[in-house]
Image (spheres, rainbow, N blue to C red):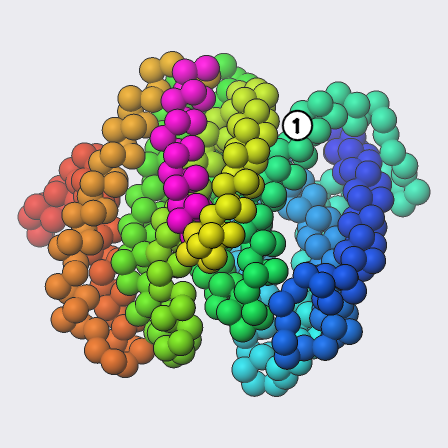
């Protein structure tokens, strides 16, 4: 496709997104008074203040939708280094800038959400500028090019529906708990959710590089090479994700104390964070089945998976929260992820890549076993280093994580061989 055609395609999707984002922001604004007064369990904030914050959140959501469009365009052009650097910069500004604002300048919730709105606007403008420089529209008044969009609609529609179902699947616990928990406890839960989301997002730089390459290999008919790359990427991601999540799960309370210095937050979050951390690592690993289907261009399996998962997960999460509150949500989060991880890859591999499952399962079992062994070996190291200071807790967590990661990485034959050769080579 020519540069001009790409520019017209991007402009077409910009126009398609316009009514969607406007409707999204409008719905959130209209619903904000009811959400503030009837849904949220707020005792310390006025409903008007809450409603204003919710409206600002709606605008931020609309901006993030456009940012996603532009990031997808940049990813498709394989501008991975720039995209990863921009994502890290925006995430640093969003989270650490927000933390600095709250800790040093203002604790007014409205100021915080105005700051998030400004960051969201900067993000959208940054990615729009980059995408437009690579895919310029022929003219500012270029309209919707139906001939370019029409062939992509079935695939785009399946991806969009899957994305909506994915949002429901991953956010239903947060929506239900926002009604159940007082705002101070929901703040603790938001801390748990932030860590869990961070675990899932760790694989994003790898995925942004991986997806276009898998697609190209499949388009060139190099199916075996694509499967080899898929297994290698899955192995690499799990080698980092599983030890990280396991260390967080085992030392959840010390982690929260080291991060926040708040004993109450640590006591509340500890039992919940462990299950969410493990479930999030499994979710990130499960996403590789989507990448395999994406490379094959066969999304119907993923669409059915999303539908069935949503139909099962929503009532299970509702019942779990109704009877066990936030701890029930954490248990449901983990066991739903673990159950689908045990069942779904077998089905995907059988349909798309017969013969792949044995090697994939071997990698998962090896990494899981070595992670457990690493935790056992590193436990004395953690207890030797950790004391009551936050610095020692951070150091102990880092040491435990590095020991576990090293054991998992060394358990892979090719890597272990390279390490052996490196250290056994005589000096000159």
The percent position of residue 270, horizontal first and vertical second, equals: 36, 64
Which part of the image, by quadrant, shows the N terminus? top right
Q: Tell me: residue 390, above or below residue 273.
A: below
Q: Is residue 332 magenta?
A: yes
Horizontal side of 113 relative to 386 (left or right) equals right
**Residue shown at 38%/14% (left/top)?**
354
Where residue 152 sits, quadrant-wise, is top right
The percent position of residue 363, horizontal first and vertical second, equals: 27, 32
Horizontal side of 320 relative to 60 (left or right) equals left
Q: Is residue 301 magenta?
A: no
**Residue shown at 33%/58% (left/top)?**
248
Q: Secondary structure at mark 1?
A: helix
Q: Tell me: residue 335, above or below residue 59.
A: above
Q: Tell me: residue 327, above or below residue 100.
A: above
Q: Which residues are magenta?
A: 329-351
User: From this viewpoint, which residue is outermost toward the bottom?
Assistant: 105
The percent position of residue 404, horizontal first and vertical second, equals: 22, 52
Helix, strand or loop: magenta stretch: helix
Out of 220 and 94, give the one closest to the viewer.
Answer: 94
**Residue shown at 70%/43% (left/top)?**
69
Out of 297 and 216, give the one closest to the viewer.
Answer: 297
**Residue shown at 25%/80% (left/top)?**
388
User: From this viewpoint, which residue is outermost toward the front?
Assistant: 323
User: From this viewpoint, which residue is outermost toward the right?
Assistant: 141
Out of 267 and 197, give the one closest to the viewer.
Answer: 267
Q: Residues within 10 Å of mark 1 (few under 14, many from 20)?
A: some
From this viewpoint, is residue 122 visible? no
From this viewpoint, is residue 299 visible? yes
Horizontal side of 204 relative to 127 (left or right) equals left
Say which residue label 1 marks. Answer: 158
Where residue 393 sits, quadrant-wise, is bottom left
């Amino acid at each position: 496709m020519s540069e001009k055609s790409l520019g017209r395609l991007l402009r077409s999707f910009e126009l398609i997104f316009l009514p969607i984002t406007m409707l999204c922001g409008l719905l959130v604004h209209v619903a904000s008074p009811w959400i503030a007064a009837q849904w949220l369990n707020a005792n310390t904030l006025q409903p008007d203040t809450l409603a204003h914050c919710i409206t600002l959140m709606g605008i931020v959501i609309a901006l993030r939708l456009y940012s996603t469009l532009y990031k997808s365009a940049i990813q498709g052009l394989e501008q991975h280094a720039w995209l990863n650097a921009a994502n890290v910069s925006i995430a640093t500004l969003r989270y650490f800038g927000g933390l600095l604002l709250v800790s040093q300048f203002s604790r007014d919730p409205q100021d915080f959400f105005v700051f998030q709105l400004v960051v969201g606007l900067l993000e959208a403008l940054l990615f729009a500028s980059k995408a437009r420089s690579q895919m310029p529209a022929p003219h500012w008044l270029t309209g919707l090019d139906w001939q370019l969009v029409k062939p992509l609609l079935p695939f785009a529609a399946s991806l969009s529906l899957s994305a909506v179902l994915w949002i429901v699947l991953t956010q239903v616990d947060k929506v239900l708990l926002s009604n159940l928990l007082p705002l101070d406890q929901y703040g603790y839960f938001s801390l748990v959710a932030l860590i869990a989301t961070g675990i899932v997002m760790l694989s994003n730089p790898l995925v942004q590089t991986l997806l276009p390459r898998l697609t190209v290999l499949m388009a060139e008919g190099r199916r075996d090479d694509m499967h080899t790359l898929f297994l290698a990427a899955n192995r690499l991601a799990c080698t980092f994700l599983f030890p990280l999540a396991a260390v967080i799960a085992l030392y959840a309370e010390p982690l929260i104390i080291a991060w926040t210095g708040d004993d109450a937050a640590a006591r509340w979050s500890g039992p919940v964070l462990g299950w969410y951390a493990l479930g999030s690592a499994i979710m990130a690993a499960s996403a590789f089945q989507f990448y395999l289907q994406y490379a094959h261009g066969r999304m119907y399996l993923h669409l059915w998976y999303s539908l069935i998962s949503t139909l099962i997960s929503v009532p299970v999460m509702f019942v779990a929260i109704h009877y066990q509150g936030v701890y029930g949500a954490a248990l449901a989060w983990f066991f739903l992820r673990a159950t689908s991880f045990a069942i779904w890859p077998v089905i995907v591999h059988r349909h798309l890549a017969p013969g792949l499952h044995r090697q994939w399962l071997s990698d998962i079992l090896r990494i899981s076993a070595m992670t457990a062994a690493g935790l056992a070996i590193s436990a004395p190291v953690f207890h030797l280093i950790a004391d009551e200071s936050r610095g020692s807790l951070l150091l102990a967590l880092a040491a435990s994580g590095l020991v576990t990661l090293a054991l998992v990485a060394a358990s892979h034959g090719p890597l272990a061989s390279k390490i052996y050769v490196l250290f056994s080579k005589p000096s000159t």
